[in-house]
């Protein structure tokens, strides 16, 4: 017999802080930092070869280019958090854009109604796919693959014989064509910084009052400082060109909304739980089926919104809207930024960060005059690298896990 | 023992359960008293898990009566058992590795603030973290960071998290299925110490275990099942391993074949 209970020791691994930081860096806890550094390298390379890459005009274009794919990626992140995949987002974005265009241009619906109907169509598609997925336990991969094949058919049918619908409604075109004046831009920027700082400090205050551990004030101030610099530089660059675009506000706004939902609400917690261990979630009383269906609805809804923004920027909807590499870029972005394909790990901000990385590569190579084949191969290489890093990080976590 | 005169927390009389032609439990009488640790032992297929699942409502009994705190009750499903105050920790623990201790503890019953926060389901992280800290401290559970992911923790810590989670609703009876299986010596000691503290806090505990050393370490009473029937009911400090093993294997017993 051993002396049970005599010495209940602690299972704390002793590790030097620096080693710990290195391990976390590799194991993916600091995935964002890794991606930001990769982005810095990418920007530096393009800047050295073509200084115009970091001009305010080009950076403004970059923001506009990444809006549509970033919005779609937000929905993809939610699905990836469940450990599922939605291959239909590209097709759905094209179909919903076509619905909006036809209703507005051919049937004379007001832009608001046309957009509303298009978004609702996206939600309905998600409801359908999510229901088939949960009800018949068909892998989401297959359900949405069917969608990937079927929805473009509906898309062509709706567009009719002409094949292209040119948009002319100022409200719809304004979604990506509106730029705010310098003053409005600064006000937005400063307000965002102020709100962020106040919330961060209040949150710390509240934890301290309850006697919980709180981040060091110095660290917090440093974080607020970093956010301040980032926001001010962004506003300054955008103001130097045409001003703060409405499209950027829409993208950041949706990111904020879904960041709040995923990290601060019960529903968001349930998404992570289902993605981490669906059986445990079910036994804890979480309605797993409901969570899954809602997430697929949100993904298709965001696909529709992304499709509308894409159409607005293109000034038209045609037969290839939402086709081509749009789907793959929307999925590749979050994965490159560190959202796991295995479920339960990721952040809505990865949609924005990933879109920024992918669009930077695409934009830079366009600027340098590379051909499409090279672009595809480089983007594919970056994705492959990111997925390999994700897999390594997962193995590292498992190795570091159960002692 | 301190339970003389108290009504048992849980009392089973003549409980039987069959799966088709297989009689997993036949005519089982079984009791757990307040603040008592009862170990449920028996060979593979003796009906230990079936008995726990019957009480937990996963496999409702075919016949017999179940009383909880002196009142006859019917347990048709897991929610019935939980409502009565019966918590069960299964062997696979059912934790989400990607969530931290606080998140796992409150999984499925997250708390939100008042007013608008309640409407949108905004989480009261501070409140939940505070309660987690208090609960773990109360149980003297050795987890340094309640915001660390459960997946990075040792088997013993995970088991302790799972047990702590079962205590959130302040249950009368806690049932543990093989809590020390696959644990090392030190981690086993931690979990056994935790079981003793549950008893000190007034919870009745039912432990399934294969390890008789562990059983004698924590149990007040040892209940032996053999082929779905009661094969012995021993007071831990008035018996020894040989007697219990005898009852398990059918060599001899003090209550078998009743």
Image (spheres, coloured by chain):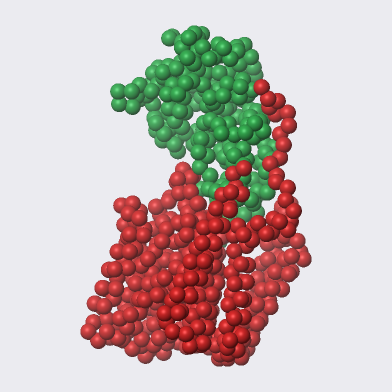
Chain colours: A red, B green
Query: Is B74 situated above or below B149?
Result: above
Q: Position of residue B177 (x, y in %)?
A: 52, 31
Location of the C terminus of chain B (image quadrant): top left
Question: Image point 62% across, 54% down: which residue?
Answer: B125
- What is the quadrant of residue A306 in the picture? bottom left
In the image shown, does B249 or B200 lie closer to the viewer? B249
Q: Position of residue B100 (x, y in %)?
A: 60, 50
Counting labels gives 0
In the image shown, does A247 or B4 lie closer to the viewer? A247
Question: Image point 48% across, 54% down: which residue?
Answer: A275
Query: Is B168 situated above or below A197?
Result: above
Question: Image point 37% across, 66% down: which residue?
Answer: A87
Q: Is residue A46 left or right of residue B63?
A: right
In the image shown, does A43 or A86 lie closer to the viewer? A43
Q: Quick check: can you spot residue B117?
A: no
Location of the N terminus of chain B (image quadrant): top right
- What is the quadrant of residue A126 in the picture? bottom left
Q: Position of residue B189 (x, y in %)?
A: 66, 30
- What is the quadrant of residue A279 in the picture? top left
Q: Position of residue A23 (x, y in %)?
A: 65, 56
Query: Is A108 situated above or below B195?
Result: below
Q: Is residue A300 left or right of residue B38?
A: left
Considering every residue shown, the one lying at the far left of the view is A161
Question: Image point 55% across, 11% down: which residue?
Answer: B243
Q: Quick check: can you spot residue B104?
A: yes
């Amino acid at each position: 017999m051993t002396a049970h209970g005599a010495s209940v020791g602690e299972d704390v691994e002793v590790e030097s802080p620096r080693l710990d930081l290195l391990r976390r860096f590799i194991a993916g806890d600091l995935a964002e930092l890794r991606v930001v550094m990769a982005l810095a390298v990418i920007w530096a390379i393009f800047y050295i070869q073509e200084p115009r890459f970091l001009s305010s005009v080009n950076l403004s274009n970059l923001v506009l280019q990444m809006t549509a794919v970033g919005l779609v990626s937000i929905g993809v992140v939610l699905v990836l958090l469940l450990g599922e995949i939605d291959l239909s987002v590209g097709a759905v974005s094209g179909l919903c854009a076509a619905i909006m265009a036809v209703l507005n241009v051919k049937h004379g619906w007001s832009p608001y109604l046309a957009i509303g109907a298009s978004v609702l169509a996206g939600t309905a598609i998600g409801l359908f796919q999510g229901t088939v997925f949960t009800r018949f336990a068909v892998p989401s991969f297959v359900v949405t693959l069917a969608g990937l094949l079927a929805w473009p058919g509906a898309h062509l049918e709706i567009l009719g014989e002409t094949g292209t619908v040119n948009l002319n409604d100022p409200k719809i075109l304004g979604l990506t064509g509106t730029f705010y004046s310098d003053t409005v831009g600064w006000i937005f920027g400063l307000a965002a910084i102020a709100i962020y700082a106040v919330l961060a400090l209040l949150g710390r205050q509240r934890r301290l009052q309850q006697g919980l551990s709180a981040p060091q004030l110095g660290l917090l101030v440093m974080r607020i400082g970093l956010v301040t610099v980032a926001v001010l530089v962004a506003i300054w660059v955008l103001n130097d060109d045409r001003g703060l675009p409405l499209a950027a506000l829409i993208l950041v706004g949706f990111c904020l909304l879904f960041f709040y939902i995923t990290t601060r609400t019960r529903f968001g917690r349930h998404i992570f739980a289902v993605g981490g261990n669906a059986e445990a979630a079910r036994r804890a009383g979480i309605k797993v089926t409901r969570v899954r269906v809602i997430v697929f609805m949100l993904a298709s809804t965001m696909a529709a919104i992304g499709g509308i923004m894409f159409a607005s920027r293109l000034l038209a909807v045609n037969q290839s809207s939402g086709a081509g590499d749009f789907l793959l870029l929307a999925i590749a972005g979050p994965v490159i930024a560190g959202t796991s394909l295995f479920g339960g790990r990721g952040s809505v901000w990865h949609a924005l960060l990933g879109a920024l990385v992918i669009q930077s590569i695409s934009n830079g190579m366009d600027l340098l005059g590379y051909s499409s084949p090279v672009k595809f191969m480089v983007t594919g290489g970056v994705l492959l690298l990111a997925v390999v890093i994700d897999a390594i990080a997962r193995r590292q976590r498992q190795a570091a896990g159960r002692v | 023992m301190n339970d003389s005169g108290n009504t048992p927390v849980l009392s089973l009389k003549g409980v039987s359960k069959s799966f088709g032609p297989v009689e997993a439990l036949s005519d089982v009488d079984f009791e757990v008293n307040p603040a008592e640790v009862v170990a449920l032992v028996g060979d593979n297929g003796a009906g230990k898990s079936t008995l726990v699942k019957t009480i937990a409502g996963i496999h409702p009994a075919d016949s017999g009566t179940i009383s909880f705190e002196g009142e006859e009750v019917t347990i048709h499903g897991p929610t019935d058992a939980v409502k009565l105050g019966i918590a069960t920790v299964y062997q696979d623990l059912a934790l989400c590795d990607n969530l931290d201790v606080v998140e796992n503890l409150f999984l499925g019953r997250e708390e939100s603030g008042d007013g608008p926060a309640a409407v949108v389901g905004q989480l009261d992280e501070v409140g939940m973290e505070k309660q987690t800290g208090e609960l773990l401290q109360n149980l003297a559970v050795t987890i340094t960071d309640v915001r660390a992911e459960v997946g990075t923790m040792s088997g013993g810590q995970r088991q302790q998290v799972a047990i702590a989670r079962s205590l959130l609703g302040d249950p009368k009876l806690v049932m543990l299925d093989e809590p020390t299986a696959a644990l090392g010596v030190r981690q086993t000691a931690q979990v056994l110490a935790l079981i003793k503290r549950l008893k000190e806090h007034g919870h009745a505990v039912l432990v399934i275990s294969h390890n008789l050393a562990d059983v004698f370490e924590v149990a007040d009473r040892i209940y032996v099942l053999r082929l779905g029937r009661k094969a012995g009911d021993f007071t831990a400090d008035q018996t020894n391993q040989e007697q219990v093993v005898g009852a398990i294997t059918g060599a001899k017993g003090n209550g078998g074949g009743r």
